[in-house]
Amino acid sequence: MSDTVIELMLGVSTFLGALGLIALLWGLRTGQFDDQSKFLDGARFDNEEELKDAVLMEKKRKEAIEKKKREKNYMPVD
């Protein structure tokens, strides 16, 4: 192989490695890997029915929070 090809391969691989490192650091900084309940939920809800119930409960909780926000912003007509 010629020196030019080796230098080009080294340059491209260094660039791609740096790009991957930057993407990893960005993901860590923005919290892309912060799913703390994933493993706990996996152990707690180990069959499909319990997992569906957990999802339903989470949906109900979010709806209750949204309803509370709507009621908080309610202004009666004068």
Image: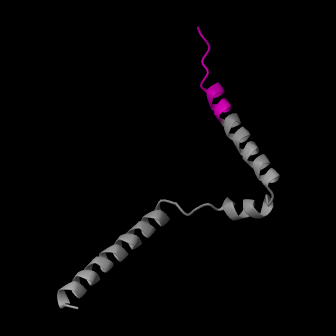
Q: Which residue is drawn at 76% across and 44% down?
A: 57
**Left or right, 9 with reference to 47:** left
**Left or right, 15 with reference to 56:** left
Q: Is residue 1 above or below residue 56?
A: below
Q: Residue at x 43, y 64 (%)?
A: 26
Q: In which quarter of the image is residue 2?
A: bottom left
Say whether residue 73 is magenta.
yes
Q: Is residue 30 above or below residue 64?
A: below
Q: Quadrant of residue 48?
A: bottom right
- In magenta, the rendered stretch is 66-78
**Left or right, 74 with reference to 8:** right
Residue 4: x %, y % from top left: 18, 86
Pick whichever, 54 or 29, lies toward us.
54
Location of the C terminus by quadrant is top right
Residue 58: x %, y % from top left: 71, 45
Q: Residue at x 62, y 14 (%)?
A: 76
Query: Residue lying furthest top in this view?
Result: 78
Pick whichever, 13 or 66, lies toward us.
13
Q: Residue at x 52, y 60 (%)?
A: 32
Residue 41: x %, y % from top left: 74, 59
Q: Quadrant of residue 5?
A: bottom left
Residue 16: x %, y % from top left: 34, 74
Location of the N terminus by quadrant is bottom left
